[in-house]
Each structure stands twice: as C-alpha cells, then as structure tokens.
Image (tube, coloured by chain):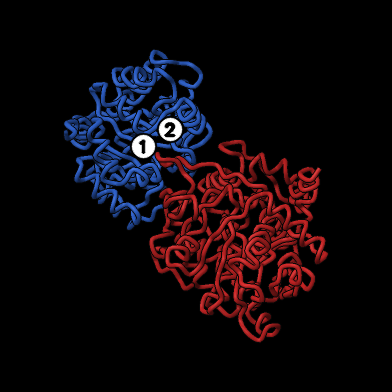
Chain colours: A blue, B red
Amino acid sequence: MTPTRGLEKRLSAARDSGAKLLIPYVTGGMTPDWVDVVHAVASAGADAIEIGIPFSDPMIDGPTIQQASVMALEGGATPTRILQSLRRAEFEVPLVVMTYYNIVFRAGHRRFADSLADSGVSGAIVPDLPLEEAEEWCEGADEAGVDTVLLVAPSSPDERAARICERSRGFVYAVGIMGVTGERSELASSAAELAHRLKGMTELPVCVGIGVSTPDQAAQVCREADGVIVGSALVRRLIEGAGPEGAAEFVAELRSGIDGSL
Amino acid sequence: MGSPGADGRFGDFGGRFVPESLVPACAELEKAFAEAWSDPAFHSELDALLRDYGGRPTPVTECRRLSERLGVRLLLKREDLAHTGSHKLNNVIGQALLARRMGKARLVAETGAGQHGVATATAAALFGMECMVYMGEVDTERQALNVFRMELLGAQVRPVKSGSRTLKDAVNEALRDWVATVSNTHYCLGSVMGPHPYPWMVRELQRVVGDEARVQCRELLGEDPDWVVACVGGGSNAAGTFAGFADTTSRLVGVEAAGGAAISRGVPGVVHGMKSYLLQDEDGQVLEAHSISAGLDYPGIGPEHAHLAAIGRARYPRADDEEVLRAFQLLSETEGIIPALEPAHALAWVAREAGREIELGSTVLVTLSGRGDKDVAQVRELLA
C-alpha cells in the first residue's frame, strides 16, 4: 500500500488556495484515548497532524513533551503499536511522524519507511538527523512514498538553509527559536525572521514550530510563514486532562487565530 | 588513532547526529579546534597550564607489593595525582582555552561521578567564566561532596530529574541548555563521545596521558608494556592512554562496568549525537546502565572505541561490582593508593586475569584515572 494522502500535495494546495496551515502535535500513546484526540484535532481544523513516536532520550524536547514521552513509554507505547493504531484508524488529514533517529536506525531505514507508508503516514520528521547524515534515510523514505521534512534553524547560514530546503519534502520546518520544544510567553523575533528568509528560498510551504504556543503567536508568525506547528501547548492541555474535546477546542482557537491573520 | 575526517567517522562509528540548531556550532568548534591544535602558541599555553597549574607530568608508579601478589609487573599511570584528582582536567583546560578563543564566556557540562564537573568548575574559576553543571539526581545523592566542591568553585549544579537520573540524562540536559545558549556558551563535554568533533578533540586533549606514559614506560621497562589497560565509561582516559600506544605491539584493553557494557552487551545505535554501541531494547529505546560507579553508568561508549573493537585493535571485557570493590581494597592495602571506583574496574580485570589471560611475568600498565576520596563514603556503606 502506498500513501494516498501526499503530504506535499495537500499542504501546497491548501497554501496555494490562500489558507494558512495548522499542524498540531500529539505524542502517540500518551493517553489511552490518544487516537480519539487525533480524530478530534483533525476535525477541529488541522491541515496535517504530527504524531510523536516517543523516545527514551528526547534531547530537543522540553519538559512537556518529555513528560508525554514518559507517559507513553510507561503506558507501553512502542513504534509498532502506535503505527498499528494509526493504520486501523482513518484520518481525513495527512499524518507526519516525528521521532528520533535511533528509533528509525534500529528498525532499519527501509523497513521503518515501509511501516510508515503501510500505516497511512505520509511524512516524517527526524530532528536529530541533520542534512549530512540524512541521505540514506531520505532515499528509503522517498522510495516508500514518505516525505522527509527537514528542519532549518535560526543558526543555519543561508547557503546551508538553501541546501536543506532543496532536500526537504512536504514542507520546510522552520525552528522558531534557538532552544528546545516548549511554551514561551512571547514569540521570538527569530521565528518571523527565519520564515521570511526561507520564503525567499523555496516553493515548499514554510511552517514554523518550536516556541509557538498561543493563537496570537500563531497569527503573528503566519504573517511571514505559511503555517505553524503547535506541540507543547496542546500536549500540556492533554497532560492536564483536556481529552479529545479540550484538544479540539484549543485547535479551533488556533485555527481562528491564524485565519484572522489573513 | 588519527583524525576522523570531515564526516567525523571512525570506521562505521561517530558522525554528527544533532538537531540543526547545533550543527553550525559543532562546525565552528571543529574549525576552531583544528586551527588551535596546529597553532604552536595554543600548545605552549596549554602545556604551561597543565604543568604549572595541573601538576603534569604525572608519574608512573611501579606497584611492588601488588605485582608480587599478582605475579605480573604492574605499573600505574597516576592521573589521581593531577589537580582535581583525575585525568579530567587535561580535557577541560584545553576546551576552556578553546572557548576563550571562540569568545564564549560560559561553560556547560554534564557529569556522572562529578570528576568532570569539578574539573570544569575549576577551569571556569581559573578563567573567570560562568559555569553550569548538569548532574543526574541519583548521582548528586551518591556524590554529594562533589556537588559541594563544584559550588565552592563558583559553579551552579543542576540536578537532572528526567529518565534514569544519571549520566545519560545529564548529557541530554546539557545539550538542551546548549541549544538555547550556543551564542555565548561552550558545551564542555567530558568524554570521547557526542557529535563530531568531540570524540576526536577530547581524545587529542587526553593523549598527553598516553604520550607521557609511553616515554615513562620505556624508561622503566626499556620497552613498551605487554598490556595497556584502562576503564571505559564514555572512554576518555582509555582513549588518551591508547593514543600513546596504538602504534606499538602493546595489547590494549578497555574495561567496562558489567552493568554498562556497551561493547559486549550493546548493539549499534545513535544517541547523544554519535553512532556507537549502545544498550537499547528492540525498539531502540536506550536502556539504563547500572554500576557501582557513577562515572561508568553510561549505556553508550565513545565511537572510536567501537571502531577499535570492530577492527580488533582493542578489546573491552567487563568487571562486576563485587570484584571492583575487592580491587579497590586491594590497591589501598598493598600500595597505599585509594583508587576511584572507575579505575578500580581496570584493576579488577588485571587482578582476575593475572596468570590466566595475562601471562605471569607480563608487564601491565593501568591508567589510574582518578583518586578514590570521592568514593570513600559510598564504599564504607557498601562494606558495612
């Protein structure tokens, strides 16, 4: 089975129609009802959903996602179980898996890429796999029909950023702030600056993640970017017991925030 | 043991598996180190500091009573006599000089047993730099005195409460700090691990141990020792020692803690920016290491050691907690030297294998990477 949802096609089409893109993040397996959460988030206005496969040593994640990862692992979540759950469900939006490279490496590049495709996942983000180390995985993912989304950071020089954009598929993940995932009370100026810089380099949608926590911040960053990824702010609500309904409510707020920016 | 080249590879191992935010900083560090390492002025400043401040060269001591007991000729490279009580200062002074060269005024470090944290705090005090040390909560408890030492030296110590609350989690937390502070901060990594250029840079900064020992052994023995043995957590004292003997016929042995034996019980994986042997489950989740010694409680190993094991140049047997405790006491009683628990692993292997794998009458050099003062309270409890 090859993925039918085509991350890049879907997101580019939405962007070209004048919409801004909203990509919420949920850690797979973090609560027993996490699949219902994903459904609720999809119906509340997400353009794609990032599904975290938890790793024991999430070095680019702050306390919130770390806690969700621990909850998931202690609850018995494994890459296989998470992907099986996704495979059984039908989602109306594309899914992008986010995980660390050792999970991929341990499974084997092609085997992991195939298991994503078989589960209806159309994209992958591996944040500790920078451009120089990524080729073998990217080739396996390309062959399986999975888009590998690469990250560009505020610290990436232009020439390097351009090469990353060139190899990225689906969209380009603009890291909004020098730091780990987590909520911030104010949007860093680096977020809009980087989005602006990248918009001049690539035809792919440019979405900003890390440090975007509120509808206002999302709206602000979407003045330059094509979309936003919101992780910790949503995951914190889920840790606090928001459940599918609370998650949908927050995602709907984000949606109207960024729609208001148009 | 040469330079790993631009991709940071030692055979199949090494590399630079870090988030994009840190790639430019690693590249900057690689360039700065390469320039400094070929600059005679950098070497003379480093050498002078290691001599006048660090107490180098450290001696090689022949263990007469223990040699007689074991039936081999045992020599110790005495890193326990260096300033701060371990080999860690060699690396830290070099990196602090490098940080200054790069215009960075803040150091962050991880520490397990506390030796590297103390060394980093020491260098920060010496150079007037700000210093933050991350230490697993389990380790802050079993090494409380070292926490106080670091604080005395003006460093801030932050207990890490995530994961197994030991060395591997301290590395994660130090990396998280560095991502957010990289413009003014140097990550002073304590072992031959992490992303390129660290495994190479730290080995080069520690090779002074092996280079000195080689000359000293030739003076004492008239030749290279038959065996060169060191303990391995991440593997910096072993890498530094082996660097002095890699091109000799000496047999190289790195002794891992039985509960953290990445080479013999792990499989290749990627964590903390490097590809190496790693204790992990079938899904790729990293397992917790368990050892009597906080400094060896690490589920991975430096990538160059993985390579030396793969090509058969060095081997990496294990020592368990019980034999380590016996070796700790044995050296104390026979030679009047209280070793740290980490090098007690190397001694434990020699004590076990003397007359077995190590032929009687062989010459054996062990790097005594640190002194045991920090472990005395813990050993007292264990022996009670």
Q: Is residue B10 visible?
A: yes
Q: Amino acid at mark 1?
A: Met
Question: Residue, x 30% and y 21% (percent of image)?
Answer: A42
Q: Chain of mark 1?
A: A
Residue A80 as seen in the image, left or right of residue B306: left
User: Where in the figure is residue B135, as x and y percent of width and height?
Assistant: 65, 45
Label 2 sits on residue: A212
Secondary structure of the residue carrying tag 2 is: loop
Q: Residues within 10 Å of mark 2 (few under 14, many from 20)?
A: many
Which residue is at a point 79% across and 70% down the rendered structure image?
A: B65
Vertical placement of residue B184 versus B281, above or below? below
* Left or right of residue B196: residue A261: left
| B76 w.r.t. B286: above or below | below
Front-lying residue, B139 or B256: B256
Placement of A229 over or under B206, stated as above or below: above
x and y percent of residue A250 in the render? 40, 19
Q: Nearer the viewer, mark 1 or mark 2?
A: 1
Examine the rendering and report whether any part of residue B29 can be seen.
no
Q: Chain of mark 2?
A: A
Tell me the SS state at disc 1. strand
Q: CA distance from mark 1 to mark 2?
A: 17 Å
Q: What residue would you read off at disc 1?
A: A98
**Among numbered discs 1 and 2, the one appearing first in the sequence:** 1
- Check disc 2 and give the amino acid type: Val
Q: In this rendering, would A23 be left or right of A91? A: right
Callout 1: 10 Å neighbours few (<14), some, many (20+)?
A: many
Rendered image quadrant of residue A2: top left
Name the residue: 72% across, 43% down: B142
Q: CB atoms at circles 1 and 2 under 8 Å apart?
A: no
